[in-house]
Amino acid sequence: MDKPTILRKRFIPFETVDISGDEVLLRNDELLVTRWKAIKPRNDICGGISWAFLKNGVKISRFYNHSGEFAYWYCDIIDVDFDREADKYVLIDLLVDVKIFPDGKVEILDADELAEALEQNIVTKDHACRALRKLNFLLEKIYSGNFPPEVCKEYK
């Protein structure tokens, strides 16, 4: 499998990080699965596996603690820009996230950042609307008991 370039673009803070060093486990037109280590040292996690659902605009990550045990699910709402010729993915973080703990507790994170980014014209109304629709899609899956997707159980 050829190794693509993978970039993570964020609006707050405004940055683009090259995560091409992550191990690519699977990729096709609908899914990009990677195994990674935390970029910056953290107390709560050391790494994980991410499933970027390229058409749905959701990246679901299984986070592991320093003992290698499952810590929680972290779901980024994203846009994906794929340049086939350059074999480059840009995963654009649309700010709002969802965290799901092993006990089933759900936290919606960074909705205030999305509002701030919209107020400051960092993101467009279109970005915000896409983010909210994708968030709704994800929450419907979670609350209906259809989370995590079966494919997210294939790698540990």
Image (tube, grey):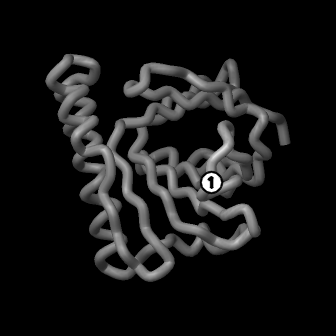
Quadrant of residue 155 within the rendered picture:
bottom right
Q: Nearer the viewer, residue 89 or 73?
A: 73
SS for callout 1: loop
Quadrant of residue 108 within the rendered picture:
bottom left
Q: Residue at x 73, y 47 (%)?
A: 37
On screen, residue 2 versus residue 69, left or right, reads: right
Q: Residue at x 80, y 34 (%)?
A: 3
Amino acid at pointer 1: Asn
On screen, residue 118 versus residue 50, left or right, reads: left
Q: Which residue is mark 1?
A: 43
Q: Nearer the viewer, residue 151 or 34?
A: 34
Q: Nearer the viewer, residue 139 or 39?
A: 39
Q: Residue at x 50, y 21 (%)?
A: 15
Say above or below: 7 vs 100. above
Q: Residue furthest front?
A: 43
On screen, residue 141 versus residue 71, left or right, reads: left
